[in-house]
Amino acid sequence: MSKDSPNQIRQLLHSFLPSVIAIIGFFILCGVTLIIRGQNPWKFYELILISGFSSIDDIGSILFNSTPLIFTGLAVAIGYKAGLFNIGCEGQLYVGGFAATWIGLNIDLPPFILIPFCIIAAMSFGGIWGAIPGILKARYGAHEVINTIMMNFIAFAIMSYLVTSIFQEPGQMEPQTAEIHDAARLPKLAGLIPILPQSNLLNTSFLISCVVVLFLYFLLKYTRWGYELRLVGNSPEVASYGGINPGTVTIWVMTLSGAIAGLAGVADVLGYHYRFVLSFSPGWGFTGIAVALMGRNHPFGVLAAAILFGFLSKVALDVELLLDIPHGLFIAGQGLLILGLVCMEGYIRIKNQ
């Protein structure tokens, strides 16, 4: 271990301190709310532990819920590292998901060929959808926030037309395509993990998300492209003076961000519904912003934050059914969790000045 390692560990722990304090504050606030409602908060804490960790099946469900958020959180985080705010993950995951669906519907190949083909298609189209705002930003100075928001609406409109007018499954009222070929479906991890029940939905898209986490960590920390990305994010003027073209970095970072967001569509299409269902995402692209913020835009931090949100999603239904707590109240608590994080971050930054 180098001499700088302890300092780096301390800096990393210090950077995650606001997230830890915000999480603790969230659960305290939940307990206070229950006391005000005349309920026992200890039953709430006991229930979330039982609901989330009482069996390997529960843990598998949490990881399943977390998988799309890992992708969208990483997509937002990689853009933010370069000083870019990608709010277009929702549209990018829809475009990527539909591209994977089209391949899975129209091409019949062995699984070891077809599945990678679907994944590449999703990343390619998601990347194109992210590259467009990047090009507009680099060439014309158009702000990526406005452009990515508009690209979301365009993606929704195109997907709605394609699904309802061209690819609608015959005889179905719900806007959805027919099922993809069996060879295009991602294997469930229950076949690889004997103790995981066969009914559990966790599939190999989670393993793909872990590979992307490791890839981005290596990219940011050990490569020239990661150095250029971080330098452009910290100071575009210094980067330009050093011979780095911020416009070029903007384009390829937004392309990479869109490609990663497209994988969130793969997780649903190839790993769960096995078809493209219109409005299949409950807002993963936008929740990914909160995940990236909670994870401090660090790949491993995003992984941990996504698992936390997956845990909250898993236990929310049980809390509603068994404790008669409205689901909306739990969602509002998640929003307060993010607000608390922002406040704690600001307080610590001011205190350190």
Image (cartoon, rainbow, N blue to C red):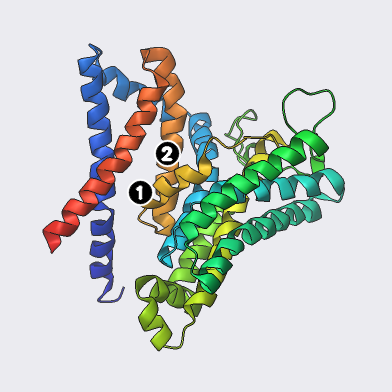
Secondary structure beneath label 1:
helix
Q: Which residue is mark 2?
A: 309
Q: Position of residue 211 (x, y in %)?
A: 56, 58
Secondary structure beneath label 2:
helix
Q: Position of residue 303 (x, y in %)?
A: 45, 50
N-terminal label among 2 and 1: 1
Q: Which residue is mark 1?
A: 294
Q: Identity of the amino acid at label 1?
A: Met
3 sits left or right of 127 in the view: left
Q: Is residue 317 above or below residue 258?
A: above
Residue at position x 56%, y 51% in the image? 150
263 sits left or right of 38 in the view: right
302 sits left or right of 101 in the view: left
Quarter of the C terminus within the rendering: bottom left
Q: Is residue 345 above or below residue 197?
A: below
Asked whether the viewer can see residue 38, the reply is: yes
How packed mark 1 is, by other alpha carbons closer than 10 Å (few <14, some 14-19, many 20 or more), is many
Q: Is residue 353 above or below residue 222?
A: above
Quarter of the N terminus within the rendering: bottom left
Q: Identity of the amino acid at label 2?
A: Phe
Residue at position x 40%, y 40% in the image? 308
